[in-house]
């Protein structure tokens, strides 16, 4: 178990670790290995046992784990969960288990939860993802450290774990359901992986090397994604968009990654078919709305692909009240700074657009709907409800980034002027552009 100590060093030597303790062979091995490691590293070890209630022997197993942890003076939290038997039982059990893990972290006020996934588990996971049509991200499998989850045995083969158990005469709980080939993971574990090893010795080790290579490549891709997103995307709800002219200059593989990244930011996981449809519409779908999930949709404009949750319009404003300066220092840049006739200051406020707002555009005499005005200025439909306006009632005086009204503009009859400063980014700004 030397790999455990090295892994502990890599994740920063945490001083409080919760172990997901089923009592099976893998978690039993990790439990005893952590007990040994804590003798030299002096961290707090705690355990959580998730009681799924799916097998009658679970009650006796829980009692054995309570006795074992008490013997070693390790605090144990038992979480009983309800698992729906409708649909995929494996997925339902996993979701319930991880929800219990989150509760345990909060209960113990810890930031690290150790899990006993090992190399053979990693190979099984990769095959499962391959069967589902996953890309490189899915095929890279589980991560050794994906906060708060720590998998220190991920590079350790099952044979090494079994040898550790035998050498140290460690008892573990046997779960008969682990041999039920009706479950896909068990079928891969007891049928497919042995067949691969029989046909090509070292197949599992090759899969693990493949996962390691893909993980490194994923990290490199992620860095490239961050560089692109900082320059050509906004990820600050209620705004989530990519600038499509820049997107379309990239390789199609990178385009797919960026679109999935945008969707993930809004909590939406795209299928391959959805990703391909969005790619197609970036060139041809101006004005189209595409439902991606029950709560998320995409919208295409001439310059942007927006992905937004349906409830975005109920969110509160992100805008700050502008700073107000008196003086005659020029007319401002029109984007974040504008000088207006001081006569219109009384009762005026900065807020978001209201549907009844109207403006007299500079150089005209008649008023028009502010929504129409924003459309004429090329403001994307999805951004218009959130645009900041300086207004007195529904009489709009200044629209940052677009223009000042005819009535509030400085003229020959202006006696005093006031310079307004809008202190935030505009909805279509990724960064302040000078």
Image: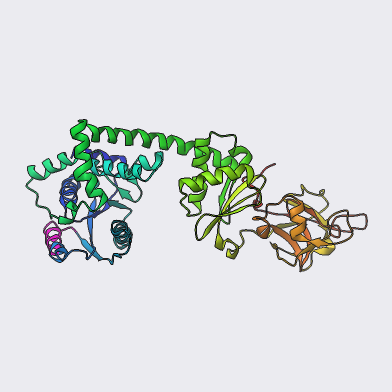
Q: Is residue 42 visible?
A: no
- The residue lying toward the viewer, choosing from 83 and 72, is 83
Q: Percent x, y for residue 98?
A: 31, 57
Q: Camera-side residue: 252 or 391?
A: 252
Q: Nearer the viewer, residue 310 or 390?
A: 310
The residue depicted at 33 percent of the width and 61 percent of the height is 87
The residue drawn where x is 46% and y is 45% is 272
Q: Main secondary structure of the magenta part?
A: helix
The residues colored magenta run: 63-74
Look at the image and tell me in which quarter the C terminus lies: top right
Query: Quadrant of residue 200 in the image?
Result: top left
Residue 9, x across and y down, in percent: 28, 40
Q: Residue 138 location in percent, x, y?
A: 38, 43
Residue 203 lies, with reference to residue 328, above or below; the image says above
Residue 247 among magenta residues: no
Tell me: 364 left or right of 428: right
Answer with left or right where residue 383 lies relative to residue 370. left
Tell me the residue at 41%/34% (across/down): 217
Q: Is residue 380 left or right of residue 149?
A: right
Residue 194 location in percent, x, y? 19, 39
Q: Work out whether 316 lies above or below 36.
A: below
């Amino acid at each position: 178990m030397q790999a455990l100590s090295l892994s502990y060093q890599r994740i920063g030597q945490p001083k409080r670790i919760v172990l997901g303790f089923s009592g099976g062979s893998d978690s039993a091995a990790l439990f005893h290995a952590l007990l040994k490691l804590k003798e030299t590293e002096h961290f707090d070890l705690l355990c959580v046992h998730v009681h799924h209630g799916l097998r009658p022997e679970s009650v006796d197993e829980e009692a054995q784990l309570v006795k074992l942890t008490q013997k070693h003076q390790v605090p144990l939290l038992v979480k009983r969960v309800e698992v729906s038997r409708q649909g995929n039982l494996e997925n339902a059990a996993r979701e319930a288990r991880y929800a219990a893990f989150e509760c345990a972290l909060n209960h113990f006020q810890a930031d690290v939860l150790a899990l006993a996934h090992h190399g053979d588990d990693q190979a099984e996971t990769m095959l499962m993802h391959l069967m589902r049509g996953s890309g490189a991200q899915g095929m890279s499998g589980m991560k050794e450290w994906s906060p708060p989850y720590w998998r220190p045995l991920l590079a350790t083969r099952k044979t090494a774990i079994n040898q550790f158990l035998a050498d140290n005469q460690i008892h573990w709980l046997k779960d008969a359901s682990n041999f039920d080939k009706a479950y896909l993971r068990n079928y891969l574990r007891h049928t497919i992986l042995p067949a691969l090893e029989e046909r090509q010795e070292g197949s599992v080790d090759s899969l693990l090397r493949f996962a390691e290579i893909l993980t490194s490549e994923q990290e490199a891709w992620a860095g490239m994604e961050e560089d692109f997103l900082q320059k050509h995307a906004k990820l600050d709800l209620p705004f989530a968009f990519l600038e499509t002219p820049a997107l379309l200059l990239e390789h199609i593989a990178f385009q797919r990654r960026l679109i999935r990244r945008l969707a993930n930011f809004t909590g939406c996981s795209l299928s391959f078919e959805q990703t391909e449809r969005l790619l197609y519409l970036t060139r041809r779908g101006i004005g189209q709305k595409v439902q991606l999930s029950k709560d998320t949709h995409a919208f295409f404009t001439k310059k942007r692909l927006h992905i937004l949750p349906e409830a975005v319009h109920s969110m509160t404003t992100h805008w700050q009240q502008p700073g107000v300066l008196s003086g005659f220092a020029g007319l401002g840049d029109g984007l974040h700074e504008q000088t207006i006739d001081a006569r219109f200051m009384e009762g005026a406020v900065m807020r978001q657009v209201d549907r009844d707002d109207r403006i007299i555009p500079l150089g005209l005499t008649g008023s028009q709907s502010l929504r129409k005005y924003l459309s004429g200025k090329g403001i994307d439909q999805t951004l218009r409800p959130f645009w900041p306006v300086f207004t007195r009632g529904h009489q709009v005086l200044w629209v940052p980034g677009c223009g000042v009204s005819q009535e509030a503009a400085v003229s020959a009859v202006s006696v005093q002027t006031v310079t307004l400063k809008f202190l935030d980014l505009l909805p279509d700004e990724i960064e302040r552009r000078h």
